[in-house]
Image (cartoon, rainbow, N blue to C red):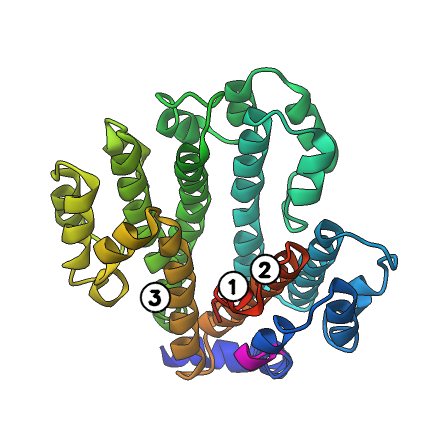
Amino acid sequence: MISDTLVHLLRDNYLEAKIRGKKSFLLQRQQLLSLAEIPTLSDIVAALADGPYGSELSKLQEVSSAVETERAIQRGFASSVNNLVSGSKGNVRQFLLEYVRRFDAYDLATLVMFKSQGKTWEEFSTARQPLGGVREGQLRRLYMMDDLRESVRIIGDKTLEERTGDIDLEEMPPEKAALVRDIFTGWGEERFYNYVVKRLHGRDRSSCLPIVGATVDLLNLSIVLRSKLIGVSNIEEHLVPVHWRLDKQSIGRLLATTDLDETLEKAGSLTQYSRLMANARQRHEETKSLAFLEMDVKRYLVGQARRIFLGFPYTIGVVLAFLIFKENEARGLAAVISGVASGLKPDQVKALITV
């Protein structure tokens, strides 16, 4: 661990100092809540003009839509990440490239869902991630293909094909689409998790695991719950075959339940994630949806990032923690923009913020 620390001090001190400086410019929760009080999209854009998203937002026309504004926020996030990549070297650079690679899975999930809903290429192109590594030309060709399964095979791999083999990708109501999205995302996060476990060492690995490990665990938990909700059989075939704290025995107890209510009850007693899942059954009964889980998981990961940032400063985990903050900030801004544009009341918009 001493040698790891010396390497960071010699090679990455500038980057880590840069990250700590960038963290001071992140929007705080109260700032996001204040933005939710602003009644018009143009006033929100004006309020963000002097911040890190100002450069992208300044390119918008006065009559730009909420979708175009959200896209500018996403480009601002991508620009921040690419700036870190260009200023990094060695293990940190490779780590950042592996982090960016995750977004290919997000794009593939969005492509499959939009195609199944009969949406146009133009609608998909505004929803895809600016950080995705797949070239736009290739994505366009995939989008024009009639066979969704073939698109998965080309951009994904044999593993992803197998995990979605018994799911009809042509007909996806909301709950089924959410399950497919989690399966695709799990495929992307598994690659990132394996990189951290197999390629990083010492404090670098241990500082990242509270985020990358929990992400894989909670995706598997989500896949089990969504599968129970819509009555999918052979749930194990859809799971990510790696785990951090949510071991096979715990997953096995969840799989052995007879219905969603029992599964939520069991999930609430998981020692690994008891605080996160303690009231899961009650919240599902109140909302008749599993949407609350996505918000809770995001809050959980932000909490882990906060703990990492307060810990030992010379690890790659600090880089990851900043990226979680930044990704969540962009997501929160997009939620505010979407909520205000949709005419939601301020309290409704604030409920979408996970900082």
Q: CA distance from mark 1 to mark 3?
A: 30 Å
Q: Residues within 10 Å of mark 3 (few under 14, many from 20)?
A: some
Q: Amino acid at mark 2?
A: Leu
Q: CA distance from mark 2 to mark 3?
A: 35 Å
Q: Is residue 177 above or below residue 166?
A: below
Return the residue at label 3: 210
Return the residue at label 2: 344
Q: Residue at x 45, y 70 (%)?
A: 317
Q: Nearer the viewer, residue 152 or 94?
A: 152
Q: Are marks 1 and 3 in contact (CB under 8 Å)?
A: no
Q: CA distance from mark 2 to mark 1?
A: 6 Å
Q: How many marks?
A: 3
Q: Nearer the viewer, mark 2 or mark 3?
A: 2
Q: Nearer the viewer, mark 1 or mark 3?
A: 1
Q: Is residue 260 left or right of residue 59?
A: left
Q: Position of residue 282 (x, y in %)?
A: 23, 57
Q: Residues within 10 Å of mark 2 (few under 14, many from 20)?
A: some
Of mark 1 and mark 3, the one earlier in the sequence is 3
Q: Quadrant of residue 228?
A: top left
Of mark 2 and mark 3, the one earlier in the sequence is 3
Which of the labelled discs sits on residue 348, or is there none?
1
Magenta residues, start to end = 26-31
Secondary structure under the numbered disc 1 in the rendered image: helix
